[in-house]
Amino acid sequence: MPLRRIYSDQPLQTGAAVTLRADAANHVLRVLRLRRGDTVVLFDGSGSDYAGEITALGRDSVTMAVGTGHPVENESPLAVTLVQGVCRGARMDTVVQKATELGVARIRPVLTARSVVKLDEARGDRRQAHWQRVAVAAAEQSGRSRVPVVEEPVTFAAALPVLAGYAVRLLLDPQGEPLRALSLAREPLALLVGPEGGLSPDELRLARDDGFRPVRLGPRILRTETAPLAALAVLQFLAGDF
C-alpha cells in the first residue's frame, strides 16, 4: 500500500491529539476514504514524521492520535531559494510542485516587466495561499518532512534588496557561463528565473549590478516552467544531493 502522508498545520507531539485542517480532512474523508483506526504518517514541517491513527471522524473533520516520531534526513545539503518570475496558472503550479520535489528550500514569486500575470494585493494573497497548498501536497507526495515556504509575490525591484544577503546569487541567462562549470559551497543560494517573456534588459542589468552571476543551462532556450527545474536538478547534482 502506498505511504499515506498528511501535513498538519499544528505542531505535533507524541501522545497528543490533532484535528486536521479542512483540506487535509477532506482528502482523508473523500479521496483516501479512510476510517477510524486507519493509520497515516503525519508531519508538521519541522523535519520529523509521526505515526498517526484516526480516532474520530465527523462530516468534515478528522481527529488523529499522534504516535512516535522520528527525524527524516532527506533534505538537500544545498538550501536554494527559487526566485521565479510569476507565470500563468498551471505553469506556476508546475514550478512550485516540481521545485518542492527537487528539494528547494524557499520560493519567492516576483512580478516582472514581462509577467503576463497581474496581481493586486488581494489576488496576490490568494495565489500565495494556493501555491503554498501546492507545495504542501508535493511535500506529502515526495516524502519531505519540511515544506518550502512560498512567499507573497512582490515586484522585481522590491525583491532585489531582500536577496542581497545571499552570498551566491545566480541568474539564468542564455548569455551566461555554463552552470555545470560552477564550484559550489554548501551555502544558501538564490536562483533567479524570468517569466514567459524572460527578464527585460533593464532587469537583467539591475540583477547583474546587484551581484547576480549569469549562468546558462545549454544551447537551447527552455520555457519558464522548465528552466528552473533543470537548473535545480543540476545544482542538486553539483551539491551531491543526486
Image (tube, rainbow, N blue to C red):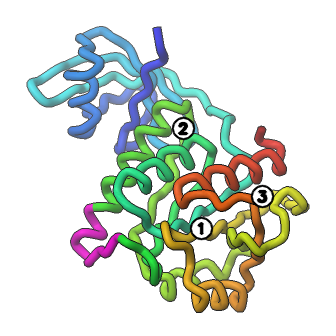
Residue 135 relative to residue 64: left or right: right
Q: Nearer the viewer, mark 3 or mark 2?
A: 3
184 lies left or right of 232: right
Q: What range is drawn magenta here?
A: 117-126
Which residue bears the numbered disc 1? 193
Label disc, if present, on residue 102 of the rendered structure: none
- The question of residue 148 being in magenta is answered with no
Q: Observer-nearest residue: 12 or 123?
A: 123
**CB atoms at circles 3 and 1 under 8 Å apart?**
no
Where is residue 118 shown, x and y percent of the image?
31, 75
* Labels 3 and 1: the sequence-earlier one: 1
Q: Nearer the viewer, residue 116 or 72?
A: 116
Dot 1: few (<14), some (14–19), or many (≥20) neighbours within 10 Å?
A: many
Q: What's the amino acid at mark 3? A: Gly
Magenta span: chief secondary structure: helix
Q: Which residue is mark 3?
A: 218
Q: State the mark number for residue 145.
A: 2
